[in-house]
Structures are given as C-alpha cells and as structure tokens.
Image (cartoon, rainbow, N blue to C red):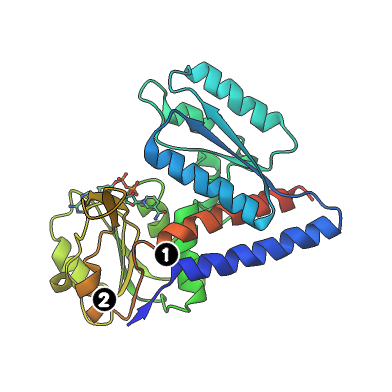
Amino acid sequence: MKILDGRKLSNIIKEEIKKEVSKRSSKKKKIPHLAAVLVGNDGASLTYVGSKVRSCKQIGFLSTLIHLKSDITEKKLISELDKLNQNPSIDGYIVQLPLPNHINEERVLLAVDPRKDVDGFHPTNFGRMVLELPSFIPATPFGIIEIIKRYKIETSGKNCLVIGRSNIVGRPISILMSQKVSYGNATVTLAHSRTKNLKELTLKSDIIISALGIPEFLKVDMVKEKVVVIDVGITRVSDKNNSKGYIIKGDVDYVNVSKKASYITPVPGGVGPMTIAMLLQNTLLACKRKD
Ligand code: NAD
C-alpha cells in the first residue's frame, strides 16, 4: 500500500509556485494577489481562511482579507464583491462558504467576475470545465487530479466510483474523471444519498473517491483488493483527549481499508492540503492570463 501524501505534494506545488513568483518579481511582472471574503466568525471558516492567507505569505503572493460582519446585507456584500471585480490589483478572490442564512449563496456566487473566480464555482467556469475549455477547476477536484497525475495512477478504463454529488466536489470530480484526458478516461459512477446498492458498487470499483462527510463510512468489507481510495471527507469528531476537544476524521476506515488498498489518502494530510495548493495555482493562472 502506498500513501498518497497530499501534504508533501502540496509543499512541492507551493515550492514550484514560489519559484515562479520570484521569477515574475525579477522580471518586474505582476505579483499574484488573492483576496478572501469572510462573513461572520464561524470557527472552521476562520481556520480555513487563516491558512489560505498564511499560504499566500509563504509563497510570496499578496493577500487581502475582507472580514465582514455576520449581519451584513446581501446587497452590501455584493457591492463589496463589485469593488473586488473592479480592482485591477486583485487577480482572484474567494467568498468563504457557508454564508449566513439571510444571504442567498447563489446570487453572491453569480456576482463574482468569472475571470477572478479562482474557486471555480461560477456557472461560466463550471460550464467551461464540463466542455474541456480553459477555466478554473474547483480547488478540491483539481487537487484530486493533481494527486492522480503526480502519483501516476492508472485511470483509463477503470471503474471509478464517486460518493457524494455536491457542486464543489462530487459532481465536478465525476465529470473530470470521465473526460478524454490523461487523468480521466475512467468509467464513472456517481453515488449519493438515494443510491440503494452502494456496497455492490464499491466492491466493483478500482478507484473510490469519497466526499460525503460521514466519518469512517467506507469499511474494509466494502472494497476490493488493490483499490485506490481518495478520501475527501473532513469531519470534526469530539475527543476529550485532544487539546482542541476534537479530531478530524475522513469518510474512510483508514486503519483497515489501507491494508487492502494499493493507494490511499490519509485524513488529515491528503486532499485537504492539496485544496489550498490548487487555489494558489488558480490564482497564479488568473494573474498570468492578464500578462
Ligand atoms: P455535501 O456535504 O454538500 O453533501 C454530501 C453528499 O454526500 C451529498 O451529495 C449526499 O447525497 C451524499 N451522501 C450523504 N449520505 C450518503 C450515503 N449514505 N451514501 C451515499 N452518499 C451519501 O458534500 P461536500 O460539500 O462535497 O462535503 C463532503 C465532505 O467533504 C465533507 O466532510 C466536507 O467537509 C469535505 N470537504 C473536504 C474538502 C477538502 O479540502 N478536503 C473540501 C470540500 C469538502
């Protein structure tokens, strides 16, 4: 069994980006600038945004955090996004989800200029991704693809099962894995909460990408020998023995499934760190497109 080490890989990618930024700097080209919009004080969101901003600093990007109060109106929030759309210094920005209940997420995401939509959530980018046109691929599926490419995992003609159909992970990765590209060409099945014969499907799968958010859902008796397992799940499970009061669990019973798998991502240290690295990659791309 080989561990798909997302932490190590993300550091390699960040190092590559850092070198490119320093080359750009010596050629007096624009330094990539990422902005993050955070509404309210949700603990997990603060952590995610904090690590995105720290990563920008590490690799020499400029970063701006726009922290807004949780009672901001939708109209005011959209006017803040307009300012980012107009600001030539900002190459790309993200709106950290979830947003408070009184704000319509769909209207907010539509207000992001697709050229600055480094999360790849705007319908323009999603549509272009489906059509295999240049776009911003959402960071988590992009990270999974990068793992597959760099570990040279064979996907052509393989049975790939994606569990979970969210717009940010399950659905896009199911599309990407079926595309006629080196990391794709798989025969893809997309399972979700209404799927009836899940164990039958998991047992037939050469590659399983799990993005449902139920800790240790995928058990060893559900997978075949030599399966490739990519675990996207991140769930906080309370643990009194941990100083934080919780530990992070993936969707996969890692201890047992790893004994059967040919390749597997750990949680933490798998897909999670890759997501940030690919957000930075998208920001660099947004900046280079302006050259
Ligand atoms: P979500 O929470 O929006 O939806 C969960 C999906 O799982 C749904 O499509 C649902 O149909 C499916 N599902 C639920 N129960 C099921 C069952 N019993 N059998 C089959 N399918 C079932 O999905 P999401 O936003 O993609 O998040 C999924 C997990 O991935 C969460 O743990 C989240 O924290 C994590 N996540 C991680 C990253 C990362 O960077 N590693 C990024 C995004 C999400």
For marks 2 and 1 on the same chain, the one whose residue lies earlier in the sequence: 1
Residue 282 spot, x, y in % from top left: 60, 53
Residue 142 spot, x, y in % from top left: 50, 59
* Residue 197 in sight from this viewpoint: yes
The quarter of the image holding the N terminus is: bottom left
Q: Residue at x 73, y 62 (%)?
A: 20
Q: Which residue is mark 2?
A: 258
Q: Which residue is mark 1?
A: 177
Q: Residue at x 70, y 49 (%)?
A: 32
Which residue is more in the foreground, 108 or 33?
Answer: 33
Element at badge 1?
A: helix
* Residue 179 in sight from this viewpoint: no
Q: Is residue 143 above or below residue 41?
A: below
Quadrant in the picture for residue 253: bottom left
Residue 214 spot, x, y in % from top left: 22, 53
Q: Is residue 265 left or right of residue 237?
A: right
Q: Is residue 184 left or right of residue 236?
A: right
Residue 260 spot, x, y in % from top left: 23, 80
Q: Is residue 261 left or right of residue 183?
A: left
Mark number, residue 2: none
Q: For the residues marked 2 and 1, what is the alpha-carbon distance in whole angstroms? A: 22 Å
Q: Classify mark 1: residues with Cα within 10 Å, few (<14), some (14-19) or many (20+).
A: many
Ligand 1 neighbours mark 2 (CB distance < 8 Å): no
